Image (cartoon, helix red, strand yellow):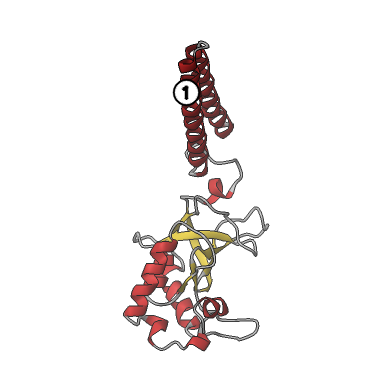
Amino acid sequence: MFHCTRWAGLSSRANFFYAGAMSKAGRQGGGAAGGRVMSRHMRRWAGGVFVVLLVAVVLVGRMGWLGSVPGSDQQRYHGRVFAVVKVVDGDTLDLDVADAKSGKDTTRVRLWGVDTPETKHPRHGAMYFGAEASEFARRLALGKQVTVKLEPFEKSRGKYGRLLAYIHLPDGKILNEELLSGGYAYADERFRHVMKGRYLQLQKEAQREKRGLWREVRPEQWPEWYRKRHGR
């Protein structure tokens, strides 16, 4: 209700402002040629301001400043602290909180913006550096109280219904970034997210320093999507 009321209020103010400006433009028009020119200018100006106000309202709503929709993932998870009860592999883990959407006792999280080598690939089996990535994530996150942050402008769930999130560790570091910096993950270029530029930069640094998998990985050991994008 708070969300809808604030949204309606801001939209009404934008409409009120636009209507007032248009009325003023009409009064100034007067019928003279100069007045008609002024009226057209006022209409353009008022219309532009109206569009800007509406865009601002949309952005504020997307950022969550008007409150979250009751029962949404933003309300249930964003900014909240949960224990990590299982590390499935380098980029997937389970939180100790029931998932209302799947009906399970825990919530499965897929880390935003990173792709670690598979440990049980359906066609290729275990991939190069998959075990190392899983152990690294396990060492940093398993049993820890972590803070969940969701993407502000994109969907909260992935293809398989997993929660897409950035995981902040107790020491303030971000698990997604630690995997990239250490050379345990690929910066996932397939999907938009606010940290994409930073994650690509972290990967470049790991490649330059030959950290983790970048020390000896061969092109044929890259994930299929990465090979397609990088021409090998």
For the point 55% across and 78% down, the residue is: 228
Residue 156 at x, y percent in the picture: 57, 55
Residue 185 falls left or right of residue 3: left
Question: Under tag 1, what secondary structure?
Answer: helix
Residue 4 at x, y percent in the picture: 58, 32
Question: Is the N terminus in the top left, top right, bottom left or bottom right quadrant?
Answer: top right
Task: Give whichever of 43, 29 is nearer the camera.
Answer: 29
Question: Residue most toward the right?
Answer: 103
Relative to 8, residue 217 above or below: below
Q: Number of labelled discs?
A: 1
Question: Residue most toward the left?
Answer: 209
Task: Give whichever of 17, 11 is nearer the camera.
Answer: 17
For the point 46% across and 60% down, the residue is: 166
Residue 135 falls left or right of residue 163: left
Question: Residue most toward the front?
Answer: 33
Task: Give whichever of 59, 78 is nearer the camera.
Answer: 59
Relative to 165, residue 72 above or below: above
Residue 164 at x, y percent in the picture: 54, 60
Residue 16 at x, y percent in the picture: 53, 21
For the point 35% across and 59% down, the residue is: 172
- Using a 10 Å C-alpha cutoff, classify the residue at mark 1 as few (fewer than 14 neighbours), some (14 to 19) or many (20 or more): many
Write down the residue under mark 1.
42
Task: Give whichever of 81, 214 is nearer the camera.
Answer: 214
Residue type at numbered disc 1 = Met
